[in-house]
Amino acid sequence: MPDCIFCKIVKGEIPSNKLYEDEQVLAFLDIGPLSEGHSLVIPKDHFERFDQCPPDTLAKVIAAANKLAKAVAAATECDGYNVLCNTGRAAGQAVDHVHFHIIPRNQGDGLFD
Ligand code: 5GP
Ligand code: ZN
């Protein structure tokens, strides 16, 4: 997808702070973090929405998110974290390339209040 920001990140046309990469998955720090360690995990192939991403690809993305969440939680010493996949404008999806947020949380941070 030529105009997709995340496809450009996958291709290295836009720089990112990479946290994890394999053949099918990329994880990197969010450019506008809601908290320290806010990360994004994406399939390298372009799928616009969660429900358009094939289950086998999704499984790989979730498996990477699972490992990364543990590492991010340990590195930030957060009290908890949210794993979020916003789908559609009404749900807050701004980038139309399926992605999972890992958002470290701390007691009383009021992030989603
Ligand atoms: P959404 O609202 O679509 O669920 O989240 C998109 C996320 O992508 C936002 O948290 C935003 O800060 C992040 N983002 C948008 N553009 C870039 C970029 O060029 N680089 C990185 N690292 N993150 C981005
Ligand atoms: Zn894309």
Image (cartoon, grey):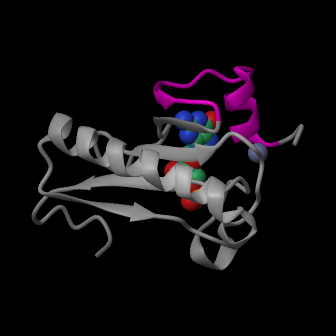
Label total for image: 0
Q: Is residue 74 left or right of residue 53?
A: left
- Please give the name of the residue rendered at 54% of the width and 57% of the height, measured from the top-left corner: 59
From the viewer's side, name the closer residue of 71 and 88. 71
Provide residue 33's location: percent of width, then percent of height: 40, 44
Q: Does the magenta stretch include residue 46?
A: no
Q: In this view, does 50 lie to the left or right of 105?
A: right
Please identify the quarter of the rendering in which residue 89 is found.
bottom right
Provide residue 95's location: percent of width, then percent of height: 68, 54
Please identify the quarter of the rendering in which residue 19 is found.
top left
Q: Is residue 104 left or right of residue 97?
A: left
Q: In this view, does 103 lie above or below 33?
A: below
Q: Is residue 8 left or right of residue 93?
A: right
- Please give the name of the residue rendered at 67% of the width and 30% of the height, measured from the top-left corner: 9
Outermost residue toward the front? 56
From the viewer's side, name the closer residue of 111 and 57. 57
- Please give the name of the residue rendered at 77% of the width and 48% of the height, measured from the top-left corner: 46
Q: Does the magenta stretch include residue 21?
A: yes
Provide residue 96's location: percent of width, then percent of height: 73, 57
Q: Which quadrant does the C terminus fall into? A: bottom left
Give the magenta part as a residue range.
Answer: 4-23
Q: Which quadrant does the N terminus fall into? A: top right
- Please give the name of the residue rendered at 22% of the width and 67% of the height, measured from the top-left corner: 110
Q: Is residue 63 above or below residue 24?
A: below
Provide residue 34's location: percent of width, then percent of height: 36, 51
Outermost residue toward the right? 2
